[in-house]
Amino acid sequence: MATLVQTAGFPVLCIPWFLLHPSRQASTSSTSLSIKTLALLYFVLGVLVAGDNMLYSVGLLYLSASTYSLICATQLAFNAIFSYFLNSQKFTALILNLVVILSLSAALIAVNDDSDGPSGVPKGKFLIGFLCTLGASALYSLLLSFMQLSFQKVLKKETFSVVLEMQIYTSVVASCLSTIGLFASGEWKSLQHEMEVFGTGRVSYVLTLVWTAITWQVCAVGVVGLIFVVSSLFPNVISTLSLAVTPLAALVVFHDKMNGVKVIAMLLALGGFASYIYQNYIDDKKARRLQTHVREIQHTA
């Protein structure tokens, strides 16, 4: 259910998609992509999304919120590597520094003997949660790079409706696979009991699922939109901003343990984020300088 809810809210995106109907017509008429090509593209992306969501759900099941968020920070390092090979992203010394620092941050969490999970979960499940979250971070980064590659090499469209189309169609595939998994695993039989024992009642249980599904779609559209406008690496950078908040929020809301290892891991992750921001500042400064130089040449000519 936790996996399904991450993509099941896609129907809410149909409203803005239909409002953008004119631009959608213009984009489809200018591109000669076959239905088979689009279907294969969205099916592969949907399968990756479903698998990634499942890994994240298992990881969150066995890890505390603070530990989970710190391991998730490694997706920025994975994304830097995949972007280098798939999207021709420059691999500078600062980006390499980012990869090393975030890898070290995850390693500290992995070897932390005091790492804890939600109440009632055996300590032996920590390794499963760690590996699933680490694998999900790698798969998520690969997915973002594939999406950027799809925009550049396959879709080649420049309208926001394309962003919505990708999110809707991949979510349809991922939701179908998650629903099959829900029934195949037999978990659907326990949903009635979950509603009944939910702390604040059945209505709150349903509303929690509904609003979680909607907010996931808002988040996903923002991620895909940033890939479309900037690059696959940039939305990961924005996501890493939550590192400064999530462990502290987990400390207050869930009473997670914030030991010295977690604090060091959080500071390392934030340091890696700062190095990436500085690299972007340098790149932007060079680009502005080049644009100024080109204007000066055109003016004198």
Image (cartoon, rainbow, N blue to C red):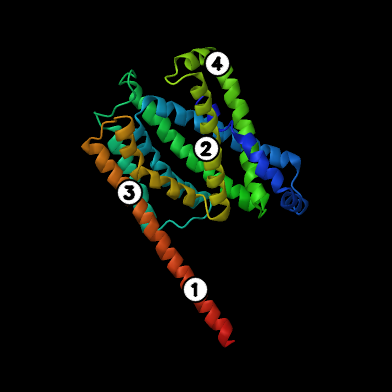
Pointer 4: what residue? 188
Disc ID at residue 223: none
What residue type is disc 3 on?
Answer: Leu
Pointer 2: what residue? 215
How far is mark 1 from mark 3, CA to CA? 30 Å
Which mark is nearer the camera, 3 or 4?
4
User: Residue 106 lies in what quarter of the image?
Assistant: top left
What residue type is disc 2 on?
Answer: Thr
Q: Do residues under tags 4 and 2 come within 8 Å of each other at their CB atoms?
A: no
What residue type is disc 4 on?
Answer: Trp
Count of number-bearing discs = 4
Q: Position of residue 298 (x, y in %)?
A: 58, 82
Q: Do residues under tags 3 and 2 come within 8 Å of each other at their CB atoms?
A: no
Question: Which of 12/170 is in front?
Answer: 12
How far is mark 1 from mark 2, CA to CA? 40 Å
Mark 3 or mark 4: whose residue is earlier in sequence: 4
Which mark is nearer the camera, 1 or 4?
4
How far is mark 1 from mark 4, CA to CA? 59 Å
Mark 1 or mark 4: whose residue is earlier in sequence: 4
Residue beneath the point at 41% across and 29% down? 60
Pointer 3: what residue? 270
Mark 1 or mark 3: whose residue is earlier in sequence: 3
Instruction: Describe the element under mark 2 as helix, strand or loop.
Output: helix
Above or below for 15 versus 32: above
